[in-house]
Amino acid sequence: MNDNAEHIGKEEKSLFAAPPMGEQERMVEAVLFASAEPVTVRDLEARMPHGCDAAEALVHLRKRYEGRGVRVMRVGDAWAMRTAADLSFLMQKETVETRKLSRAAIETLAIIAYHQPVTRAEIEEIRGVAVSRGTVDQLLEMEWIRFGRRRMTPGRPVTFVVTETFLDHFGLENARDLPGLKELRQAGLLENRPLPGTPQFGDGEDEPEADAGQSELFED
């Protein structure tokens, strides 16, 4: 009787035992590969069997993809599989359209990115001109910025911060890895003129004025 009870106990325990780490790694790989958006550790563990350690599986998976054409990268608080940065040129034919922002939108986005969290009044102080509601609305609709916490000051003004969508677009883990002017130009999002409130990295060239007739997607 005792032997039977012990056997049943072992059987029940095995039903709830977490899969081997190698299998957990395969599960995480499958979810990241199939997901168009970055996935958090919490979401991974919600999909995986009870007792799995998605964070540890990610460590093993990330190491396995080091030096490969696809890498496992962190995007804010989430994870995703992305093409290695040095091979991005191979994907250029897949680009349907380069999205251009207006000068006002670029300045507003850059100020938010480099000074976040920042209020509308602070953006206007840095730019030296008023920020139109349309400019902010366009950036919100693109999901490149979002509302942050309100300032604990009179009026409790709302702040703005960049989103994980913005970080993912530039292949960044967090805002500390923000691109410089050269990267912004290469992405087709910056004219050859300096931006207010952003670090000047110095490309060794003068900043020529852009063609006044250049078409812009968004107008301030």
Image: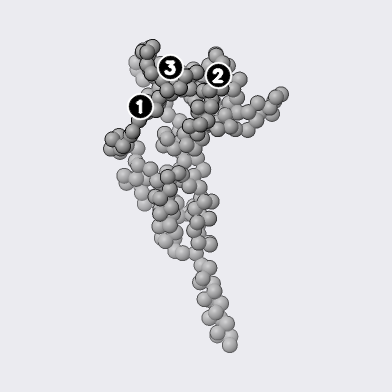
Q: In which quadrant of the rendered image does the N terminus lie?
A: bottom right
For residue 201, say whether it is visible: no
- Residue 186 has which mark? 1
Q: How many marks?
A: 3
Q: Secondary structure at mark 2?
A: loop
Query: In the drawing, does residue 216 fall left or right of residue 41?
Result: left
Point 45% across, 22% down: residue? 218
The x, y position of residue 57, in whole percent, is 45, 55
Q: Position of residue 66 (x, y in %)?
A: 35, 47
Disc 3 and disc 1: Cα gap in Å? 15 Å
**Scheme of image coloration:** one colour
Residue visible at 36% across and 28% down in the picture: 98
Q: Which one is in front in this view, the residue at disc 1 or the one at disc 2?
A: 2
Does the CB distance between marks 3 and 2 fall below 8 Å? no
| x 40%, y 24%: residue | 100
**The disc labelled 3 sits on which kind of residue?**
Pro
The reply to whether dot 3 and dot 1 touch (C-beta < 8 Å) is no
Q: CA distance from mark 3 to mark 2?
A: 18 Å
Q: Residues within 10 Å of mark 1 (few under 14, many from 20)?
A: few
Task: Give the side of residue 149 with respect to residue 102, left or right.
Answer: right
For label 3, the residue is 194
Q: Position of residue 216 (x, y in %)?
A: 41, 20
The answer to whether 180 appears left or right of 139 in the picture is left
Residue under pointer 2: 131
Callout 2: 10 Å neighbours few (<14), some, many (20+)?
some
